[in-house]
Amino acid sequence: MALSLFAGSAGNAATLLEPTLHLKPQGVEGGGGRVALTLDACGGKTDTRILSALVDNRIPATIFVTGIWLKRNAEAVGIMRAHPDLFELENHGGRHIPAVDTPQKIYGIRSAGSPDAVQAEVESGAAALAGAGGPAPRWFRGATAEYSPSAIGMIRRLGFKIAGFSVNGDGGSLLGAKETARRIGAAKDGDVIIAHINQPTHAAGEGVVQGLLALKQKGMTFVRLDDAEGIGNDGTTD
Ligand SMILES: [Zn+2]
């Protein structure tokens, strides 16, 4: 009896996907390769170590912002808007709720839990960006970067490409500086790096800067997602 109840409840939870994203191979001989840096601004504040390093070293980045973060970080948004050649702002949802349409927890965060709630998360994130001025977002990345397969289809029908990644740079901002720098510094041609720009007190942020400077020194080119043809799996970009 207990076993069948357990099987029943497990059957309701969707199998989650964590899609990857790569850039189309550059195909330029002698080039140092190119990578896309994506930084999530889930909530909280702004890591000015990273923001300053990007501006000072002219490193372009795609920033995934939530409605929550936009409201609380007007100064950082102003800096990003002042450098449209460097920063592309994309949709990380209205309230940082995982885009999973069945009720379950992912890394301790409660999922949206229904198709309507997934749609509300995606649309409220886009509305928050529109309200903050600037171009309409074309990419979506849900909180935790995990999705139910049906949510992926829904997000695509709402007109967004879904931003996976190929290098987990900072382990949810929880890694130390050294390991973060090592992971980011090891990125190869075509990689899409994910890290966070909303945890100014974490050691990982220092590692993000070190890793990026190492890549730049190696001659790597940085592109935003809108500047490159990203190829995702699980139906996230095609
Ligand atoms: Zn996030």
Image: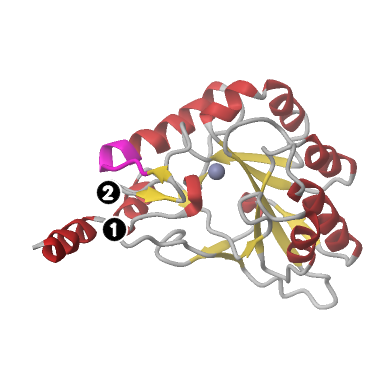
**Residue carrying label 2:** 102
Apparent side of residue 39 relative to residue 160 in the rendered image (left or right) = right
Apparent side of residue 36 relative to residue 14 in the rendered image (left or right) = right
- For marks 1 and 2, the one nearer the N-term is 1
Tell which residue pokes out farthest to the left in this image: 1
Question: In the rendered image of this protein, does residue 186 appear above or below residue 162?
Answer: below
Task: Look at the image and tell me in which quarter the C terminus lies.
Answer: bottom left
Q: Determine the image quadrant of residue 182.
A: bottom right
Q: Residue at x 87, y 61 (%)?
A: 214
SS type, badge 1: loop
Q: Nearer the viewer, residue 237 or 147?
A: 147
Q: Which stretch appears magenta?
A: 111-118
**Amino acid type, label 2:** Thr
Tell which residue pokes out farthest to the front in this image: 2
**Amino acid type, label 1:** Ala
Q: Residue at x 34, y 41 (%)?
A: 112
Image position, residue 78 (x, y; %)? 73, 24
Question: In the rendered image of this protein, does residue 53 appear above or below residue 132?
Answer: below
Image position, residue 120 (x, y; %)? 35, 33
Alpha-carbon distance for marks 1 and 2?
6 Å
Q: Mark 1 touching mark 2, by CB under 8 A?
A: yes
SS type, badge 2: loop
Is 112 magenta? The answer is yes
Image position, residue 107 (x, y; %)? 46, 51
Is 214 magenta? The answer is no
Q: Residue at x 23, y 60 (%)?
A: 10
**Residue carrying label 1:** 14
Q: Residues within 10 Å of mark 2 (few under 14, many from 20)?
A: many
